[in-house]
Image (tube, grey):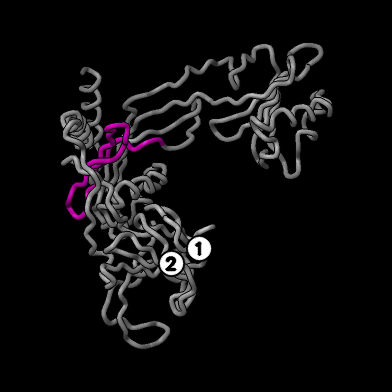
Amino acid sequence: MQKLILLLFIALFVYSCESEKDIDSTKSIIDDTLNIEEVEENKLFGILVDDYIHKSGKFKNGQTLSDILPQFGIGYQKIDELVRISKDTFDVRKFRVGKSWHVLLKDDSLNSCDYFIYEIDKVNYVRYHFNDSIRVDLGKHPIRVDTVISSASIQTSVWVSMQRNNIDPLLALDLSEIYAWTIDFFGIQEGDKYVVEYEKRYVDTNYIGLGDILSAKFTHSNHEYYAVLFTQDSLTDYFDEKGGSLRRTFLKAPLRFSRISSGYSNSRYHPILKIRRPHHGVDYAAPRGTPVYSIGDGIVKEKRYAGGYGNMIKIKHNGTYSTRYAHLSKYASGLKVGQFVKQGEVIGYVGSTGLSTGPHLDFRFYKNGSPINPLKVESPPALPVDSNHIDVYNKLLKEKMELLNIW
C-alpha cells in the first residue's frame, strides 16, 4: 500500500509540473520488475569466466567455423565432428553474417579453447563445448521485464507521437492491433491521446523489445476506449470497461498506417478514364509492397487478374459478408483459391496493377452480394468475460482504470 501511495504521489507531482504547452508529452515509470534469473557478474553465457580469456567477433560474408576456430587451436577434425553432432541442436548452416561469436580460452600457459558460442538472437545462443568431449547445447540470456506507463497527446499520428517521446514506435503497431476493431487508425485526430501500461524486455541493460500491453486507455473523438488484458479459462484477450471483448468479426481496415485517398461514392471522377462512375469501395494509399490483411476469417473465392482492378483477391467470410482487395502488386506466397485464411493473415501486397495512377489498395465490402461502405460496417463483438470470471475481472478493471486515469 505504501508503495502504491508513493507511486501515486510521484505520478501526480510529475503531472502537475508538466508544461501546458507540451501537448505531446510522455511519462514513464517502472511499476514492477520481474527477474527471470539473477544475473551473476562473473558469468557469461551461463559459464563462470573468472579463469577464461574472452575473445569475440562477428561473422563476415563467406566466413565459416573453419575460418575462425583453427586460430584458437581447434583442428579441422574436431570442427567436422562439431558440425556433425550439432545438426539436431543447431545447424551451423544457419550462421548469419553480422551475428556475434565468442570464444573462451583457458587463462593459462596453453590458452586452450573450451567454448565457442554463437548468438542466435538477442536472447538465444548455442554453446559448443571443447573442454571434455565435444558437446552442443542451447541457452538463453536471463530476461528482465519492466512494467512501464507511457502517455502522450497526438498531433499527427500515433507513430510520430511515440518517436517524439522516445517510446518504441512498435508499440503503435501493438495498439493498432488491440484497437483494430474499435478505432479507425486512419481517422486519428489531433488531440486524441493514449495511456499505455506495457512491458519492456531487457538482457542486462540492453533493451530487446516489447512485451505485452497490460492495459490501455485511448481517447478518440472525445470517447475513452479502455483495454485490459485478462485470462479466462486459459484464453487471454483484451476486454473493455463493460467486460466486452475488443475482438470483432472484422478488422477496421485491411492494412496499417496509410491514408484514405478515395472514399465510397456513387459518382467519383476516375483519374484515368476521365469520367464519373460509382466507386463502391475505399482506396488506401500506401507504399508498394505494404502487407494487406484479410479483415476476417474466410475462404478465398477468387485470386486472379481482373482487368482494371489488376491483381485481385475476393474472400467469402460467411453467408452474408465478403470482401475484395484489388490493384495488388503480388499475392501472399502459397495463397490458393479455396484456401481458408484467418483474420489478420497477410494475403497480398499493395501495388498499382490495372487502372491505377499509383500504389494503393482498392478495398470493397459486400453484404448479401451488394456493396456497402466499409467505413460504416458494424461488426458484432466476440465473447465477453464469462459470468464465472466477471467479479475477478471487475476488480482488475477497477485497479487498471485508477492507474490509467492518473496520467
Q: Amino acid at mark 1?
A: Tyr
Which residue occupies the extreme right position in the image? 76
Which residue, given by chain and number where applicable, does mark 2 sit on? 313
Residue density around tag 2, few if under 14, some if 14–19, many if 20 or more, within 10 Å: many
The answer to whether residue 230 is magenta is yes
The kind of secondary structure element at disc 1 is: strand
Q: Amino acid at mark 2?
A: Ile
Whole-percent x and y of residue 303? 47, 67
The answer to whether residue 86 is magenta is no
- The answer to which quarter of the image holds residue 35 is top left
Residue 331: give its label.
Answer: 1
- The answer to which quarter of the image holds residue 273 is bottom left
Whole-percent x and y of residue 297? 36, 54
Position of 109 relative to 226 (above/below): above
Q: Write the residue at 70% across / 39% down.
A: 93
CB of mark 2 within 8 Å of CB of mark 1? yes
Position of 7 relative to 359 (above/below): above
Q: Left of 331 or right of it: where is 395?
A: left
Whole-percent x and y of residue 351? 48, 68
Main secondary structure of the magenta stretch: strand
Q: Write the residue at 65% across / 31% down.
A: 88
In the image shown, does 247 or 66 lie closer to the viewer? 247
Query: In this orientation, does residue 47 appear?
Result: yes
Whole-percent x and y of residue 65? 76, 33
In the image shown, does 282 or 389 lie closer to the viewer? 389
Q: Write the residue at 38% across / 48% down.
A: 173
Span shown in magenta: 211-239
